Structures are given as structure tokens and as C-alpha cells.
């Protein structure tokens, strides 16, 4: 890809694109929040706060590095922060994860079609593959516009469900006790929050880095990262309380938020199923764009073919199944992403001047 041009990307579009890239099937389903936060009872709130702060700080740092280096791919950021050898290893991890997460999102779309619309999962996977492919062909502007359009609907839906759940069924001490019996993904809330922010930023870097290069003002990056981090935190808290107030019912279901929506009414369940599909779309688009931008060593005359071949390959890999891919892929990448965190902290402390350009 050619170097991106500097444009006037708004604060809202940065924030919305950041949120939309992170949220996806796991986030919207409630399964991620259940395992990473609700499983630790009230301590899970500390985890939400920590993750929100990490989303803001590291998101802002990635945007700044992208602007300073005028990057068109996340690989330049990774090698700047972690050096050639370690950066190459992290680059490999991110590249594999972007492709794997794309396949997971396509598989998630199939699961939604099967479980919520009672249609063959093949139709869901095909639809997700096609619309993601068409969006990424339009370039970074098309990706940003598509994601920023969907995000406000996503946040409104989870906040509505949280308020409705808490109004009709407030959290009790018994709910908190039940939540603490659930096996979380890490030994404690602190490590869980680190892991959650880590693997999500591994996804987000693919879009944040070139978006930083496309923005004129640093203050726009700052406020975009701040609102993006706060938006993610608000979304997580909304899902956290929705799950906690229904913990006895949702602790063993595959898609907690759909179950909660069904308790409100069939219309809400249908609407949220569509919202969930939209959230899967925003993450799939971010993953596909990031993976294709990494293939910039291939002659860009073949860019469309790279997008097409990548989408087709992800479609076939998606047949492994959504739950299996998320179970084994996400936590492993999260721990690997902590090394990248270390590199970002190193740059912030020792290479700060390079980010002032």
C-alpha cells in the first residue's frame, strides 16, 4: 500500500473506529466480559477500570507512533517499539492472530445465523466474508466510515439492556457470591484485565497505526483515544452489570447477552441479534484490513486479489467453529501481546521525543 495521506479524521471517527475494531462476537455476546470480569465478582470492576486506562494509554501511544512514523502498516510500529528481532516475533504473532480472528468472526456470523435466525451457518459465513471483503477494498476511509456508523448503535443497545436488567433485577449479594464461583481466565482480576486489554490491542493496532498517520493534529488523537477508551469501558461495565444481575441464568450459556435480551422480549432479542452481527462485522473488517496491510511487500497491483484470497482462506478456516477458535487463540495471544506492551512503555519513557513530530 502507498503511504497514507494526512486528512482531517474527526475525534468521533477515531473513537468509534477504535471501539468498533475491539468489540466483536466475544464482546457483544457477553462471554468475554463474563470470563474476564464478571467471574471475579465486585473485583471485576477494578479490572474494568484498569482495562479502560490501558485502552486509553496504549491506544494513544500507538496513534502517536503511527503519526510520527507516517506508517501504512502496524509492522513499522512493532519494530520501532520492540526492535528488529523481538519485533519480528511479535509481528508474526499479530499477523497470525489477525487472520485467525478474521476466521473466528466469520465463524461467529455463522453461529448467529444458526442459533438466532435458524438458518444454515453457511449463509452467515458467506455474508460476513463478502461484506467484509467489499468494505476493505474501499481502503482505510471505507473501513473507518463503516465502523464508525455501527458503533453508536452497539453502545446504545448494551447500555439499554444494562439499565433494563438492573431496574427489573438489581444485583444482590447472592449474585456476587455466585459470580465468584465461576472459573475466570486468569488467577486474579489484575492479570485478567491485562490479558484482556493486551489481546484486544493486538487487534486494534492494525487500524490504529495507519489511522494515526492519517490525522493532522495530536490533540485529535488524544481525545479520540480517550473517548475510545471510555466508550469501551462503558460498554464493558454495561455488559458486566447485565450479566451480574442475571448470573444464575447466564453463567453456563454460550451467548449470555442474547439470553438476557430474550428475557426482555422477542423483539429485543431479534434486534440484539442483528446488533451482534454488526459488531462481528466491525471486527472482521478491522482484522481483514490489518492483515492485508501487512502484505504490503506484495506488489499492490494485486491488492484486490490479496483481499479476495485472504477472505476465502479465512472462510474455510472458519469451519473449525467459533467457540474452539476463541477458546485457544485469544488468551495465548493476550500473553504474547504483553511483550508489545513492554515495548510501548519503553518508547513512551525513552523515545518520547520521537513522538513530538
Image (cartoon, helix red, strand yellow):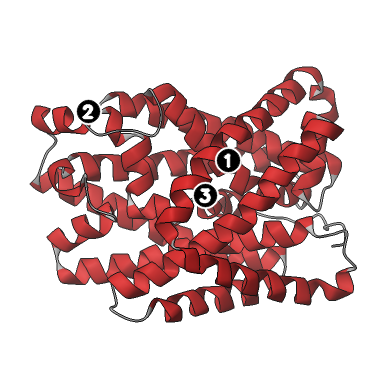
**Callout in the foreground (3, 2):** 2
Judge by depth and name the residue closer to the eye, 106 or 81.
Answer: 106
Task: Tell which circle, 3 or 2, labels the residue nearer the N-terminal end.
Answer: 3
Residue 216 drawn at (x, y percent): 77, 47
Q: Left of 143 or right of it: where is 110?
A: left
Crowding near pointer 2: few (<14 within 10 Å), some, many (20+)?
Answer: some
Q: Quadrant of the C terminus?
A: top right
Element assignment for label 2? loop
**Callout in the foreground (1, 3):** 1
Residue at numbered disc 1: 333
Q: Identify the residue shown where x is 14% and y is 66%.
A: 265
CA gap, disc 3 and disc 2: 26 Å
Task: Tell which circle, 2 or 1, labels the residue nearer the N-terminal end.
Answer: 2
Question: Does the CB distance between marks 1 and 3 fall below 8 Å?
Answer: no
Element assignment for label 3? helix
Q: Left of 156 or right of it: where is 107?
A: right
Considering only vertical position in the picture, is 133 above or below 174? Answer: below
Q: Identify the residue shown where x is 46% and y is 38%.
A: 230
CA gap, disc 2 and disc 1: 25 Å
Residue at numbered disc 3: 22
Q: Left of 226 or right of it: where is 307?
A: right
Quadrant of the image occupied by residue 301:
bottom right
State whether residue 227 appears in this view.
no
Considering only vertical position in the picture, is 216 above or below 110? Answer: above
Crowding near pointer 1: few (<14 within 10 Å), some, many (20+)?
Answer: many
Element assignment for label 1? helix
Q: Quadrant of the N terminus?
A: bottom right
Residue at numbered disc 2: 180
Amino acid at each position: 500500500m502507498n503511504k497514507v495521506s494526512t486528512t482531517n479524521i474527526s475525534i468521533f471517527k477515531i473513537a468509534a473506529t477504535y471501539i468498533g475494531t475491539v468489540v466483536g462476537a466475544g464482546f457483544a455476546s457477553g462471554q468475554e466480559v463474563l470470563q474476564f470480569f464478571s467471574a471475579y465478582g465486585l473485583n471485576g470492576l477494578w479490572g474494568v477500570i484498569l482495562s479502560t486506562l490501558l485502552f486509553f494509554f496504549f491506544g494513544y501511544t500507538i496513534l502517536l507512533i503511527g503519526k510520527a512514523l507516517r506508517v501504512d502498516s502496524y509492522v513499522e510500529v512493532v519494530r520501532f517499539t520492540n526492535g528488529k528481532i523481538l519485533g519480528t516475533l511479535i509481528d508474526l504473532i499479530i499477523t497470525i492472530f489477525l487472520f485467525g480472528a478474521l476466521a473466528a468472526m466469520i465463524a461467529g456470523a455463522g453461529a448467529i445465523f444458526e442459533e438466532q435466525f435458524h438458518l444454515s451457518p453457511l449463509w452467515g459465513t458467506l455474508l460476513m466474508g463478502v461484506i467484509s471483503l467489499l468494505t476493505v477494498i474501499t481502503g482505510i476511509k471505507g473501513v473507518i466510515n463503516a465502523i464508525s456508523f455501527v458503533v453508536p448503535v452497539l453502545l446504545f443497545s448494551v447500555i439499554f439492556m444494562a439499565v433494563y436488567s438492573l431496574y427489573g433485577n438489581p444485583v444482590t449479594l447472592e449474585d456476587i457470591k455466585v459470580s465468584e464461583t465461576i472459573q475466570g481466565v486468569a488467577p486474579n482480576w489484575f492479570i485478567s484485565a491485562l490479558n484482556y486489554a493486551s489481546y484486544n490491542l493486538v487487534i486494534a493496532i492494525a487500524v490504529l497505526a495507519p489511522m494515526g498517520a492519517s490525522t493532522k493534529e495530536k490533540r485529535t488523537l488524544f481525545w479520540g483515544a480517550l473517548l475510545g477508551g471510555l466508550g469501551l469501558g462503558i460498554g464493558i461495565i454495561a455488559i458486566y452489570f447485565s450479566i451480574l444481575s442475571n448470573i444464575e441464568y447466564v453463567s453456563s450459556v454460550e451467548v449470555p447477552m442474547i439470553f438476557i435480551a430474550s428475557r426482555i422480549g422477542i423483539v429485543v432479542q431479534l434486534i440484539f441479534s442483528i446488533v451482534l452481527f454488526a459488531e462481528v462485522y466491525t471486527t472482521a473488517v478491522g482484522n481483514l484490513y490489518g492483515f492485508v496491510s501487512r502484505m504490503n511487500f506484495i506488489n499492490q497491483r494485486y491488492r484486490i486479489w490479496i483481499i479476495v484470497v485472504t477472505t476465502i482462506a479465512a472462510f474455510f478456516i472458519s469451519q473449525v467453529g467459533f467457540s474452539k477458535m476463541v477458546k485457544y487463540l485469544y488468551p495465548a495471544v493476550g500473553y504474547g501481546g504483553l511483550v508489545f506492551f513492554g515495548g510501548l512503555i519503553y518508547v513512551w519513557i525513552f523515545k518520547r521525543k520521537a513522538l513530538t513530530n
